Image (cartoon, rainbow, N blue to C red):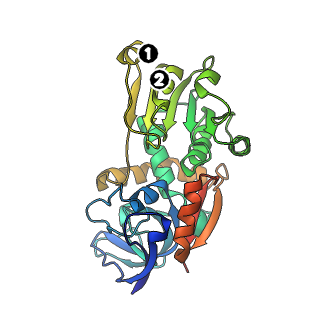
């Protein structure tokens, strides 16, 4: 048996409760991971509210999309890993537990110099940023990017990777303190959305790529601050998913509007993404050009407190559950 955090019913953070569950049974292409740490992500909160159901095959009531830990068991077809290997992994659910099963091909070795807590905050953000900013958005050296939510887990990852690969980085944040932190991570400038309008601030220095998790009334402003051939990429819609589109702007500027969600994507996509990330991003992580930013850690049993913190949006970087 194992301890897992269960969504007992859709609702506030208090609906998260510790329960005893059976240890997952792994498939032939899977590994069983003894979880040492698990990352908290915004989709976990949305799932807890009953608005983001788990995909087929994933635990329906145990949240958690990224973990770091030690391989406890390997499936019959697994060749890359052995029992005792330390890995971090992207999972479709079930991460808030003492054990979780993961497909062997979406596990990655813990980067040199990273501990379990730091590594647990990597998979969801790295996979999301690489897929959207560098693959879908095709960000190139010498281009400029606007990252909304610069102090979030996604934001701090996008800042550092975009800067490393030669882009000019602007972020929006909710306070000057968060903005300064983003500058320290490599951002070139910040816009405090509580006191400034990013459309006005960027009127004279438009950008090539925008990574947006806000949606809603940011949409038209985003179109206005994109350069010709610009790319607008959506990974969330916290302020709403219904917008009005002026097609003339898209045609005149030759804009690309795209976006994606990661959790429900097919395994073959996640596998190919893991290969690219290991080749392109892991060397960056291990070269001291990337700083893991952990804002707070909580014991597994205190997952409700971790969710409450995330919902305040006061954090900078990642919130992590530590599992004994």
Front residue of this view, candidates 223 and 165? 223
First of labels 2, 1 by sequence position: 2
Q: How many marks?
A: 2
**Residue lying farthest bottom?**
1
Judge left or right: residue 25 versus residue 36.
left
Residue 96: x, y in percent? 46, 71
Which label was assigned to residue 275? none
Q: Secondary structure at mark 1?
A: helix
Judge left or right: residue 322 versus residue 15.
right
| Circle 1 crowding by C-alpha within 10 Å: few under 14, some 14–19, many from 20 | some
Q: Secondary structure at mark 2?
A: helix
User: Is 58 placed above or below 186 here?
Assistant: below
Residue 129: x, y in percent? 49, 45
Residue 10: x, y in percent? 38, 64
- For the C terminus, the image quarter is bottom right
Res 102 visible:
yes
Which label was assigned to residue 223? 2
Residue 116: x, y in percent? 58, 69
| Circle 2 crowding by C-alpha within 10 Å: few under 14, some 14–19, many from 20 | many
User: Is 192 placed above or below 220 here?
Assistant: below
| Distance Cα–Cα, label 2 vs label 1 | 9 Å
Residue beneath the point at 42% across and 81% down: 19
Which label was assigned to residue 253? 1
Res 97 visible:
no
Residue beneath the point at 41% across and 71% down: 81
Instruction: Say if mark 2 contacts mark 1, CB within 8 Å.
Output: yes
User: Is 163 placed above or below 52 here?
Assistant: above
Q: Nearer the viewer, mark 2 or mark 1?
A: 2
């Amino acid at each position: 048996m194992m301890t897992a955090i269960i969504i007992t019913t859709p609702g506030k953070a208090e609906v998260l409760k510790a329960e005893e569950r059976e240890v997952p049974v792994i498939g032939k292409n899977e590994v069983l991971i003894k979880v040492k740490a698990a990352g908290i992500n915004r989709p976990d909160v949305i799932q807890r509210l009953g608005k983001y159901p788990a995909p087929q095959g994933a635990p329906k009531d145990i949240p958690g999309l990224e973990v770091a830990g030690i391989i406890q068991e390997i499936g019959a077809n697994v060749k890359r890993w052995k029992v005792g290997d330390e890995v971090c992994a992207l999972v479709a659910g079930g991460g808030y537990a003492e054990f979780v099963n993961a497909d062997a091909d979406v596990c990655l070795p813990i980067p040199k110099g990273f501990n379990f807590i730091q590594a647990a905050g990597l998979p969801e953000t790295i996979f999301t940023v690489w897929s959207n900013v560098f693959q879908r958005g095709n960000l190139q050296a010498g281009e400029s990017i606007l990252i909304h939510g610069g102090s979030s887990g996604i934001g701090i990852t996008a800042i550092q990777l975009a800067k490393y690969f030669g882009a000019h980085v602007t972020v929006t944040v909710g306070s000057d303190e968060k903005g300064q932190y983003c500058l320290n991570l490599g951002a070139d400038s910040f816009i405090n959305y509580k006191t400034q309008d990013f459309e006005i601030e960027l009127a004279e220095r438009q950008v090539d790529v925008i990574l947006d998790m806000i949606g809603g009334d940011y949409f038209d402003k985003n179109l206005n601050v994109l350069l010709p051939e610009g790319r607008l990429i959506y990974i969330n819609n916290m302020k709403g998913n219904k917008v009005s589109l002026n097609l003339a702007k898209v045609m005149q500027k030759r804009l690309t509007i795209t976006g994606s969600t990661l959790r429900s994507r097919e395994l073959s996509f996640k596998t190919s993404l893991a290969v690219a990330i290991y080749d392109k991003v892991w060397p960056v992580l291990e070269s001291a050009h990337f700083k893991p930013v952990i804002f707070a850690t909580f014991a597994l049993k205190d997952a409700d407190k971790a969710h409450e913190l995330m919902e305040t949006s006061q954090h900078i970087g990642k919130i992590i559950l530590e599992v004994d």
